[in-house]
Amino acid sequence: MRYVLGIDGGGSKTVCILMNDARQVIGRSEAGSSNYQSIGIAATLKSIQSAICSAVTSTVKIEAICLGLAGVGRAADIENVKVLVQELQNSQLLPIIWDLQPSNIVICNDALIALVGGVGHDVGIVAAVGTGSIIFGRNHQGKTKRVGGWGYILGDEGSAYKIAIAGLQAALKSYDGREISTSLVENFKQHLSLASIEDLIEVIYRQGWKVKEIAALAPIVDLAAASGDEVANKIIDNAAEELIKATSTVINAIFSQNSGLEVITTGSVWRGSSKIHERFTASIINEFPHAKVIFPRFEPAYGAGLLALQRLTR
Amino acid sequence: MRYVLGIDGGGSKTVCILMNDARQVIGRSEAGSSNYQSIGIAATLKSIQSAICSAVTSTVKIEAICLGLAGVGRAADIENVKVLVQELQNSQLLPIIWDLQPSNIVICNDALIALVGGVGHDVGIVAAVGTGSIIFGRNHQGKTKRVGGWGYILGDEGSAYKIAIAGLQAALKSYDGREISTSLVENFKQHLSLASIEDLIEVIYRQGWKVKEIAALAPIVDLAAASGDEVANKIIDNAAEELIKATSTVINAIFSQNSGLEVITTGSVWRGSSKIHERFTASIINEFPHAKVIFPRFEPAYGAGLLALQRLTR
């Protein structure tokens, strides 16, 4: 048997999978964050090394590795990660006999491994909608197209962060008398134990809430929409529309109207109670009858393993 | 003659006016920021003391003071500023004989002094639309109403920050193929010397741009709108609509449909080339025929002086 490593390096955790050439998972483990843009290259190396160390329990020869990392896209990023892979090979801590041709080192962003893991092969679209949002596709010719993924200031339309922000803004507009009444005012007050909705200023600015804390309020909006709140429903509809538009743009860019394709939906937003997944699916199927909208078959780290395996069989 | 001090304490500068009871400005000076929420109470005291020191050049008896400060609204804020005024009275650095009854110390937010300075008395509405946005009104009975002013995360609709953000997002949507073509892509690239519009990620996130730097991009959107760019025009129209809605809400809340009133427009957004001021004015006049939309007659620090003076004549 031959062996490869698949690494999924995200902002909250790192997943490592040891896979054999029959696509079987031999070992799997998790470690801390490996978003090197925010934690730096040294801490990223440590997380990845720790994940590999737990996944590989007895000595094994590794012939290919794929690292799908959040925030990696530019040539400079890829060079940095190449150095990191060299460090891994020099490490005395891992029970690994490295046999890596340069062409067997795959470095890519986390959207591609989510797509490959989600579909089980490398053609399709992934709509990753959690704290942030990105739609990424790859066709049979290997052509890729990305829409979104611009982050919480410049984009991330339809994301949990944007849904939460829209909910907070709507609650304050309602409080001001600029917007119809909405249960969001009471819901936010209760959830955050606020005496007045004005105290949102205290919470958001003075306590210095960041993207993750704010995005965690999205379920408040989702539940209000599910309960029939008109303002909340409009927010969820807007989010669904943004995601439909972004996905249509990817499909139109690299797929023909009549080709069958799978759209993988991954991330916290899709699991809401407000049927945002159903709204999205109905609209995509209506526009592209040959498309299927599904949840991931496998996790992104598995996708990384498959991409590493591809290099052995070339 | 009797003398008062009017202080306008904002995020970028502090203005102090020494005024006599004939409403004449005897001294005026500027110093650094006095937004105590962001720089702390000690630095705020220093800015205010420095502004007073330059405005008051020879010994004078001060019988009232008004401080209109950004970010001051809650009871706890007002208590903090009272302590600050006590420190001023204890200071040996100022050539001032203090004769302050507690009732002659006025502490309020910067919207009220902008209104009073802008109109020249204390009834009307101010639409302050710069980096942030707030609409604030006061009627003949002394009743006040505030709409907006929730800051860049929770609100500030129509502000320079929101116009800039909408412009950046539209440029990236256009680049993705989700939005019609817009000159904003090239305009941002040129202005920021970017090789590709994708490099916005580098500028905004990696260089850690904050609210002020981003808000300073609003003129790019404004100029594109003035040149006929459809996407930019839609952004300016949306901003105008938000400001019209917020202002209507204030008028409807505290003024009768037929009472004459003045709406003061202050802040950088109103000075754009895209005729946002004209759009706003036409709509307000149409909805409230007895309203007048004007630019400020006097600056906010002058308004603070007038509010201090009111206490002497009570």
Image (tube, coloured by chain):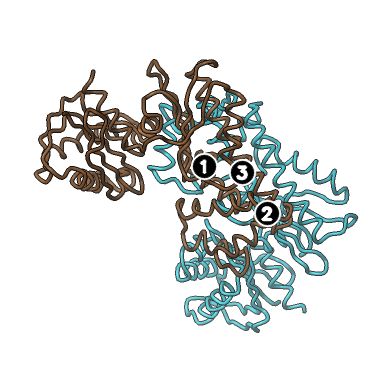
Chain colours: A brown, B cyan
B222 or B309, which is in the foreground? B222
Q: Which residue is mark 1?
A: A270
The quadrant of the rendering that contains the N terminus of chain A is: top left
Which residue corresponds to the image point at 45% horizontal and 33% vertical from the top-left? B192
Which residue corresponds to the image point at 65% horizontal and 84% vertical from the top-left? B101
Q: Distance between the Cα atoms at labels 3 and 2? A: 17 Å
Q: Which residue is mark 3?
A: A236
Q: Which residue is mark 2?
A: A173
Q: Badge 3 sits on which subunit?
A: A
Disc 1 and disc 2 in contact, CB within 8 angstroms: no
Residue A256 seen in this snapshot: yes
Q: Nearer the viewer, mark 1 or mark 3?
A: 1
Q: Badge 1 sits on which subunit?
A: A
The part of the image, by quadrant, that contains residue A27 is: top left
Give the amino acid at mark 1.
Answer: Trp
Give the amino acid at mark 3.
Answer: Ile
| SS for dot 3 | helix
Instruction: Tell me: residue A58, above or below residue B170.
Output: below
Residue B190 seen in this snapshot: no
The quadrant of the rendering that contains the C terminus of chain A is: top left
Q: Position of residue B1 (x, y in %)?
A: 71, 77
Q: Earlier in the sequence, mark 3 or mark 2?
A: 2
Instruction: Tell me: residue B220, above or below residue B62.
Output: above
